[in-house]
Amino acid sequence: MKRNTLFGIVCLFTILVLASCDQPRRPTAVPGSPLLTFERTGGIAGFQDRLVIGYGGEYYLTRSGRSERIGSLSPGKFTRLKEWMEQIAPFTLRLEDNPGGPDNLVRQLSWAGLGRTTPDEAQQHEILNWAVGLLDELSAPTDTKQP
């Protein structure tokens, strides 16, 4: 009887180990690497903006290659970002309004989320629009505002 019980436990353990092998490992945040990078270049206004956000909510913004702003997201904005980070898998979205033509506005978003859900077009655009809004908010001339 002990032999059968031991055999059963070993079989059960083996099945559990093999079942877990099928599961793809969830990506982890790499320290010092960005979660989100948003770049806006060209257009009639001649944009040259870059917003980089880390996994901890820290951000770095450059505008026209000259002005810089470094800080941390507000708790509300970081909460939203963290929800996406945990749910949505990595993707890159590149949009051009006049490819190959004059004054082509290029917007590119690189997302390194830790989730397993492949985002649909609407989810990609939601994150893009959030990044555009944040960039505009951070570019506002007031120093008293925190994003």
Image (cartoon, rainbow, N blue to C red):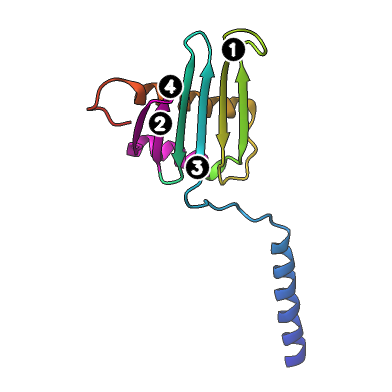
Q: Nearer the viewer, mark 2 or mark 4?
A: 4
**Disc 1 residue type?**
Asn
Of the pair 122 and 44, the residue shown nearer to us? 44
Magenta span includes 51: no
Question: Contact, CB < 8 Å: mark 1 with mark 3?
Answer: no
Residue at the disc numbered 4: 64
Residue at the disc numbered 3: 34
**Disc 3 residue type?**
Pro
Q: How far apart in space, not on screen, are marks 4 and 3 (Cα)? A: 20 Å
Q: Nearer the viewer, mark 4 or mark 3?
A: 4
Measured as percent of width and height from the top left, residue 62 is found at 41, 29
For the question of whether residue 41 can be seen, the reply is yes
Q: Earlier in the sequence, mark 2 or mark 3?
A: 3
Measured as percent of width and height from the top left, residue 15 is found at 74, 70
The crowd level at tag 3 (other Cα within 10 Å; few <14, some 14-19, many 20+) is many
Residue at the disc numbered 1: 104
